[in-house]
């Protein structure tokens, strides 16, 4: 096997380990089917049967150090000597705290958010532990860069921003060979997979192969917010082509250059993918569907939810975070969920998921399901969804009620006088001043959720809501908004209904106790747990969610609650059942502390080390 010292490392995805063996540079590569030995609370693994590839060029020695997920100037002198990298680093020894300061200084020099995104992704390549230390140092500051809204722009520019593999690209042409493609991923102990086909990326539409930025960003938050070890997470892009003509004509596009393959071939790809993942990583490997188009999202969830450990974040994750916000809002309005009439702008994945979970919450309060459904109205691109309207999907028919047809959201709000409006259609400015004024006129505390992403697609801004309602509006958004100060001096901190409150904690909890099927009851429990963590002080400031800087603690408590729920309802398959479930979950949390690379060195007693000799 020959290596080009300039390029070999660029072809190796990640986690290279460099050691000095007999004074020769040695590269340890994990083979596809290595047996791993799980380790303690850091979540790291050691390969018990590594393939040893001796590299004959000193030039590659530099590349191995340069691109491996190592510690930079945090290496001790002993480590530098043993690893054979002494002299490649400045004669300075830094703590991780100083490295964090250096990163922040460089970060502040970047011109815009896309530059900041590329900078942080480069840090993830060079020093994974430092990357997560940066994210957890100020989650509220960095989450909008690695997740919404910046990740939307990053996906649009993914062909230019792509540097190194961070996940698997599986194409329609790999059909019948997906198990082989999965073996290209060096890690065997995968607990969570996030997969997209790139057809409905945020509110941006079909981005094809560029959609890979979404599962990469999602799984980064599994670690930053939920504490799942990154080596247990696998981003996957299923490339079946794209219907985006601009991408097909773009010479820099990095995906398959043909129209989307649909029908039986598409279904066969998904079926093989689900089975291949479960065969390789186990039936308790969590598979999160992300940004699939409505036509596929609902049917794939319905098809696979009882066969595999899977959920759709756009449907169920969005539902949980939205209902969590509504449950917190109920503490402000001093009412029950069943007291409310809710109008949705949009009738896609997010709307259906939220509506179903609201229905469950109302049923839990004692309201019959048929009456709960009648309290929920939806407006799509053709107007109010009513009985008798042509071409309604099965999902929409459940929320079609007897009423005259109405085209405009303004008229719908004026006629139905809802207590809450929820925007999930990615129509910027859909909540007009007239609509917001109407909501304020017939509600003392109108609930206005503008949940569409990214920020440019929000139905209204936080400032518009608070200003028009004179501070009476209860507001939440999908993307972050700055605090709003009204003329009377009151300052409100808009609640961000970010799915990151949900999927990292759900992922940690589900994988911790090896749940085989993720039920809607888990998501209702999730919503209730998040709402319970909102303090009275938070509510007084306009927050409907805990501060983002506490999200890691929120995810831990959510995971513990899910583990307790799973064992109580006989859903967990990990036995024996842990007595102290919080301590058990904490033991799984990824640590950003550096590993010790120096070989354990010690001496025997001098006489025991004496060299025996004889005269020949």
Image: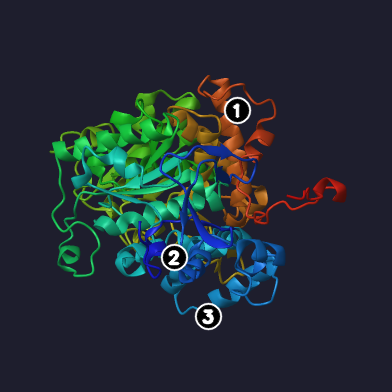
Query: Neighbour class for label 2 at 10 Å: few (<14), some, many (≥20)?
Result: some
Q: Which of labels 1 and 2 is toward the front?
A: 1
Q: How many marks?
A: 3
- Helix, strand, or loop for circle 2? helix
Relative to 444, 254 lies left or right: left
As drawn, the residue found furthest toward the top would be 570
Q: Residue 561: which quarter of the image?
A: top right
Can see residue 366? yes
Residue 493 is marked as none
Q: Position of residue 305 (x, y in %)?
A: 35, 30
The answer to the question of whether label 2 and label 3 lie on touching residues, with beta carbons closer than 8 A, is: no
- Residue 462 visible here: no
Residue carrying label 3: 109
Cα distance between the residues tagged 1 and 2: 42 Å
Question: Badges 1 and 2: C-beta atoms under 8 Å apart?
Answer: no
160 sits to left or right of 604 = left
Q: Earlier in the sequence, mark 1 or mark 2?
A: 2
What is the image's colouring? rainbow
Residue 528's x, y, as percent? 55, 36
Q: Given this view, does label 3 or label 1 mark the residue nearer the observer?
A: 3
Q: Tag 3, which secondary structure?
A: loop
Q: Is residue 398 placed above or below 605 in the rendered structure?
A: above
401, above or below 110, in the image: above
Give the side of residue 476 with respect to residue 531, left or right: left
Residue 464, label in figure: 2
Vertical relation: 606 (above or below) 358: below
- The numbered mark at residue 564 is 1
């Amino acid at each position: 096997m020959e290596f080009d010292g300039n390029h070999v490392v660029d072809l190796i995805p990640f986690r290279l380990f460099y050691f000095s063996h007999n004074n020769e540079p040695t590269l340890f590569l994990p083979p596809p089917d290595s047996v791993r030995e799980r380790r303690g609370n850091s979540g790291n693994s050691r390969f018990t049967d590594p393939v040893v590839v001796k590299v004959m060029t000193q030039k590659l020695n530099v590349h191995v150090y340069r691109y491996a997920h190592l510690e930079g100037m945090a290496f001790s002198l002993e480590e530098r000597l043993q690893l054979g990298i002494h002299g490649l680093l400045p004669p300075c020894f830094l703590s991780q705290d100083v490295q964090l300061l250096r990163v922040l200084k460089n970060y502040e020099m970047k011109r815009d958010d896309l530059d900041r995104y590329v900078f942080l992704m480069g840090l993830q390549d060079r020093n994974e532990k430092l990357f997560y230390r940066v994210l957890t140092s100020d989650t509220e500051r960095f989450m909008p860069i690695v997740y919404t809204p910046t990740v939307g722009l990053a996906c649009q520019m993914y062909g230019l921003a792509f540097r190194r593999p961070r996940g698997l690209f599986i194409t329609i042409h790999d059909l019948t060979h997906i198990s082989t493609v999965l073996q290209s991923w060096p890690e065997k102990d995968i607990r969570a997979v996030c997969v997209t086909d790139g057809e409905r990326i945020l509110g941006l539409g079909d981005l094809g192969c560029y959609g890979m930025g979404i599962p990469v960003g999602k799984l980064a938050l599994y670690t930053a917010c939920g504490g799942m070890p990154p080596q247990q997470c696998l981003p996957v892009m299923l490339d079946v082509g794209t219907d985006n003509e601009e991408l097909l004509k773009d010479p820099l596009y990095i995906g398959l250059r043909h129209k989307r393959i649909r029908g039986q071939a598409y279904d066969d790809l998904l079926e093989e993918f689900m089975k291949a993942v479960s065969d390789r990583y186990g039936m308790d490997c969590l598979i999160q569907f992300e940004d699939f188009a409505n036509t596929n999202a609902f049917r794939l969830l319905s098809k696979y939810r009882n066969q595999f450990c899977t959920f759709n974040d756009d449907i169920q994750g969005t539902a949980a975070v939205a209902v969590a916000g509504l449950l917190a809002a109920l503490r402000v309005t001093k009412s029950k969920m069943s007291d409310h009439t809710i109008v949705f702008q949009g009738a896609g994945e997010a709307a259906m998921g939220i509506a179903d979970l609201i229905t469950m919450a109302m049923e839990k309060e004692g309201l019959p399901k048929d009456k709960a459904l009648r309290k929920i109205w939806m407006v799509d691109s053709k107007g109010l969804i009513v009985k008798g309207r042509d071409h309604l999907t099965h999902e929409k028919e459940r929320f079609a009620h007897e009423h005259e047809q109405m085209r405009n959201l303004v008229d719908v709000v004026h006629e139905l006088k809802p207590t809450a409006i929820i925007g999930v259609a990615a129509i910027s400015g859909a909540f007009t001043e007239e609509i917001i004024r109407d909501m304020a006129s017939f509600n003392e505390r109108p609930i206005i959720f503008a949940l569409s992403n990214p920020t440019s697609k929000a139905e209204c801004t936080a400032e518009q809501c608070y200003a028009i309602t004179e501070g009476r509006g209860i507001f939440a958004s999908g993307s972050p908004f700055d605090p709003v100060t009204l003329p009377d001096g009151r300052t409100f901190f808009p609640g961000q209904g970010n799915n990151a409150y949900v999927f990292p904690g759900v992922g940690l909890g589900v994988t911790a106790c090896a749940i085989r099927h993720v039920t809607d009851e888990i998501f209702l429990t999730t919503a209730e747990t998040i709402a319970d963590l909102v303090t009275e002080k938070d509510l007084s400031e306009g927050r409907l969610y805990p501060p983002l800087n506490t999200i890691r603690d929120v995810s831990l408590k959510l995971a513990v609650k899910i583990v307790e729920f799973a064992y109580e309802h006989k859903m967990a398959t990990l036995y024996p059942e842990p007595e102290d479930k919080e301590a058990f979950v904490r033991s799984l949390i990824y640590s950003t502390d550096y590993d010790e690379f120096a070989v354990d060195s010690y001496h025997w007693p001098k006489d025991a080390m004496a060299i025996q000799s004889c005269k020949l």
